[in-house]
């Protein structure tokens, strides 16, 4: 079952990764070819049963080969259409209704031609419907059911053909048994096929959900540092302001700037500067609380949101982080390098907006820079 499910992963046009149009068309052709091969094998099984009936003298020896030739011609026509990508001009690129109509017409026609072994073709009608239902819509099933109902009504009500299920001799009984065993086996395979399809679609759905989740995460994260990007951290700030207002709790915000970062880029190069930003972000994540929010505000500026934190506690927190950053062995990134930070820390006031609190934090940050950097100023 796992092998079948694995092969059926190719039976859907959906995919987690993006694909070019030629790749999609090529995969569709492969999918349709596999379905046509299964249909061809089903016709071969019917032909074998018909040959056994012919050996028993129930029908002529030409019925089996004639049935196989006609059925293979229909398979060949649909294969040509598929390989020429004509199917892809239709919404239903499997042409389910068309293939069902041809199969039904084939079965009904041979019931009329060889009613003495009509049971073979009646059983194959069930198999054809079982295969068709895997890819058909309720409307397509209704159309196919209408076609077969009209055909059977003509055969049973408007003709006097004795549609038989031979069991007179031992060989006929063997052939009839073989017919039912083959029909049941094919229906069982269709059931396994459907189960494998469901498993494949379920696994594909899980992968899609994981991909969508990853996309959502990427949409909220800064690609370089892994911290929240500006849009995400601003959204978090709005949420924390609303939460603080509802709960009447304190909330502090810090704008953090890496000191002389332009000089670091100029002296050591931009790749080294990127590594500094990543290392700084990792250091911050390792030393803040789970409820704190940290994101890249722009360039070498970062925003730290400290929920349920008073102004004094926020000052202590930023001083601790400043010392941690300054004490890191930055020479492991590039010899002779030192990195420090400056920050402006403010605490939310009643009815204050995100813009106003950020403006105050920005003033405090510039004050820290003007006073020599590597310091924390409270606004």
Image (cartoon, helix red, strand yellow):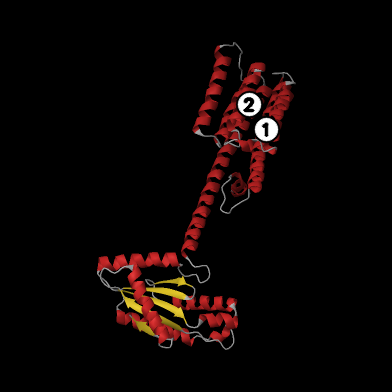
Q: Residue at x 69, y 23 (%)?
A: 53
Q: In front here: 202 or 368?
A: 368
Label placed on residue 78: 1
- Occupied quadrant, residue 154: top right
Q: Tell me whether circle 1 and circle 2 mark residues in contact (CB < 8 Å).
A: yes
Q: In front here: 163 or 343?
A: 343
Q: Earlier in the sequence, mark 1 or mark 2?
A: 1
Distance from disc 1 to disc 2, alpha carbons, whole Å, reads: 10 Å
Image quarter hosting the C terminus? bottom left
- Occupied quadrant, residue 271: bottom right
Disc 2 designates what residue?
Answer: 102
Residue 32, given in percent of the width and then of the height, sits at 64, 39
Residue 257, given in percent of the width and then of the height, sits at 45, 79
Q: In front here: 108 or 232?
A: 232
Q: How many marks?
A: 2
- The crowding category of the residue bearing disc 1, from other C-alpha atoms within 10 Å (few below 14, some 14 to 19, many at least 20), is many
Q: Secondary structure at mark 2?
A: helix
């Amino acid at each position: 079952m796992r092998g079948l499910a694995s092969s059926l992963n190719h039976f859907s046009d959906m995919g987690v990764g993006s694909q070019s149009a030629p790749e999609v068309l090529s995969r569709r052709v492969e999918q349709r070819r596999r379905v046509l091969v299964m249909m061809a094998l089903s016709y071969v099984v019917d032909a074998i049963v018909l040959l056994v009936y012919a050996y028993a003298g129930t029908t002529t020896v030409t019925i089996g080969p004639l049935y196989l030739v006609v059925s293979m011609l229909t398979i060949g026509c649909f294969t040509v259409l598929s390989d020429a990508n004509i199917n892809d001009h239709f919404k239903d690129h499997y042409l389910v209704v068309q293939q069902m109509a041809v199969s039904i017409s084939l079965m009904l026609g041979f019931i009329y031609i060889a009613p003495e072994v009509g049971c073979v073709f009646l059983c194959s009608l069930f198999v054809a419907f079982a295969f068709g239902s895997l890819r058909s819509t309720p409307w397509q099933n209704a159309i196919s059911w209408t076609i077969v109902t009209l055909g059977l009504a003509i055969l049973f009500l408007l003709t006097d053909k004795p549609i038989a299920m031979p069991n007179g001799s031992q060989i006929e009984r063997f052939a009839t048994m073989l017919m039912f065993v083959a029909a049941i086996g094919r229906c069982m395979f269709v059931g396994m096929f459907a189960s494998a399809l469901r498993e494949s679609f379920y696994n594909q759905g899980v992968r899609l959900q994981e991909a969508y989740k990853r996309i959502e995460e990427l949409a909220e994260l800064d690609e370089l540092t892994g911290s929240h990007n500006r849009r995400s951290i601003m959204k978090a700030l709005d949420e924390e302001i609303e939460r603080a207002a509802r709960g009447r709790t304190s909330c502090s915000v810090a704008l953090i700037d890496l000191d002389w970062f332009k000089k670091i880029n100029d002296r050591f190069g931009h790749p080294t500067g990127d590594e500094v930003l990543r290392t700084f972000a990792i250091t911050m994540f390792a030393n803040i609380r789970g409820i704190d929010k940290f994101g890249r505000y722009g360039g070498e500026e970062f925003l730290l949101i400290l929920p349920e934190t008073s102004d004094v506690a926020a000052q202590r927190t930023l001083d601790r982080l400043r010392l941690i950053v300054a004490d890191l062995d930055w020479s492991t990134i590039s010899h002779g390098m030192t990195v420090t930070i400056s920050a402006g820390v403010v605490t939310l006031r009643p009815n204050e907006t995100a813009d106003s609190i950020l403006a105050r934090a920005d003033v405090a940050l510039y004050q820290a820079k003007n006073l020599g950097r590597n310091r924390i100023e409270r606004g």
